[in-house]
Amino acid sequence: MKRTDIRISDYDYPLPEERIAKFPLEHRDDSKLLIYDRGTIRQSRFASIGEALPPHSLLVFNNTKVIRARLIFFKESGARIEIFCLEPHDPADYERAFAVKEACQWQCIVGNLKKWKSGSLHIDFEVAGQTHRLSARKIETVGKEQIVEFNWNGDLTFGQVLETLGRIPIPPYLNRESQEVDNSRYQTVYSKLEGSVAAPTAGLHFTPELIEHLCSTGHQRAEVTLHVGAGTFLPVKTDDVSEHPMHTEHFEIHRDTLQQLIDNRGQVTAVGTTSVRTLESLCALGARILTDGDPQPERTIGQWELYDIPDEQEGKILLEALADYMDRTQKTALKAATQILIMPGYRFRVVDRIITNFHQPKSTLLLLVSAFIGDDWPSVYTYALENDFRFLSYGDSSLLIR
C-alpha cells in the first residue's frame, strides 16, 4: 500500500550550480564511481565497475535512442517558435511514427505559444540537393500541450526530417543551447530504438570496450526499451508526494530478456532508473495475469498499481506468469506503458542493484534512490558533494548495492 506521509521537502539537499556537469568528460568511462555497498561508501573509476559488481551480474540496459525532438520555426514577423515533440499521436506507435511519410501528428510542447495564434509554420530545407518544406499546424490543445500536425513533401520519413532539422533536447538545467558534442555524447553507445526525449543517463558512462570487457569477465547483458519522456524533468510541486501525478512512458520487453531475468534472480543490475521502472513494471503485468488471466498491456500501469500486489507474489512468480502468457500467445515481445512512482515503502521484486547518476533535489528519481537504499541516501549525496563528484545528466555515477 502506498504511503501518504512522505514529504518532498525531506528529499532536498544543497546543489551548487558549479557542481552540475554542463558538458561530458572527454572519455565516457573516466567518470568517478561512488560505490554504496550495504551501508559502506567508497569511490572508484567507472572503468573499473566490473570489479565492484558481484560475479556473473546481469546488467540490464535501456536501448532507447534520443531523437532530435526540438524543431525551431520562425514566423514572418521573426518570432521564434520552438516545437518540442514529446510522443507520437497519429500514428501513435513509435516505429510507425518515424517511418511514416508526408504527414503525422505529435503531442508537443510549444515554446512562445502566445506568438503562434493560428496558421501554419514552415521550414524550407535541402536533402541530397532536393528542396523540401516542413509545415506545422496546431489542431488541438490537451492540457498544457498541443497536438501538432506536420506535413512535408518528398520521399522522406519523419525520422529523416527530424534527423535533418531537429536538435537534441538536452536537459533544461544545463542552461545552454545544444551543441555538436551533444549529438553523440547525449546518447548511449548501445542506443537503437528511437523514441526518447531525454537520455537514460546512467548508460552514458559505458563504452563498447567496457561492455565487451564486462562480458568477457563473466558478466551478462540484457536490453529493454523504455522511451524517456520530458516528464522525467518535472519537479514535484506538491509537498505530499502521493498527490504528484506521474507521467506516462512506453516500454517493450522481449521474451528472451524475460528468460534472462528469471534465470538470474538475485543478480539483476539495472543500468539507470529507466531500466528500474521497466523491470519493476513487469510485475504489474504478471499480477494482472494471475488475477485476470491477461496482462492487458493496452492499459497503462498506474502509478500505485504495484503497491497493491500481495507480498506472497514474489518477482519470480510474476515474471514466470508473464513468460507463460507470452509462450501461450506466441508473443516474442510485449509493449506497454507505465506511470509507476517508486518511493519509500515500495517493495522491489526484480532489481537487486542500480547504476545511476546523481539526481536533482526534490525529484521523483531521488525518491527512487531513497526507496532502494533507505535513509542512507543523505550520506551518499553528502559524500558525493564533499568528494567533488559531478552531478546530473553529464555527471558522475554511483553503484547502489542493497
Image: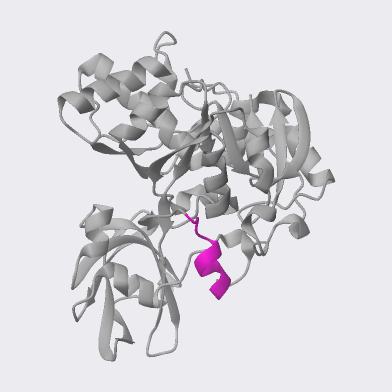
Question: Who's the residue at 72% across and 27% down the image?
Answer: 376
Residue sticking out furthest to the top:
312
Residue sticking out furthest to the right:
386
Quarter residue 162 falls in: bottom left
Residue sticking out furthest to the left:
329
Where does residue 39 sit, x and y in percent of width and height? 74, 24
In the image, is residue 182 part of the stretch drawn in magenta? yes
Residue sticking out furthest to the front:
216
Q: Nearer the viewer, residue 132 or 217?
A: 217
Question: Who's the residue at 40% across and 37% down the image?
Answer: 339
Q: Quadrant of the C terminus?
A: top right
- Examine the rendered structure and indicate whether residue 142 appears above or below residue 309: below
165 sits to left or right of 156: right
Quarter residue 293 falls in: top left
Whether residue 341 is visible, yes or no, is yes
Question: Who's the residue at 64% across and 62% down the image?
Answer: 24
Give the colour scheme of this rendering.
one colour
Question: Who's the residue at 70% across and 27% down the image?
Answer: 37
Boundaries of the magenta span: 180-189
**Main secondary structure along the magenta-highlighted residues:** helix
Where does residue 50 sit, x and y in percent of width and height? 63, 38
Where does residue 207 sit, x and y in percent of width and height? 56, 54
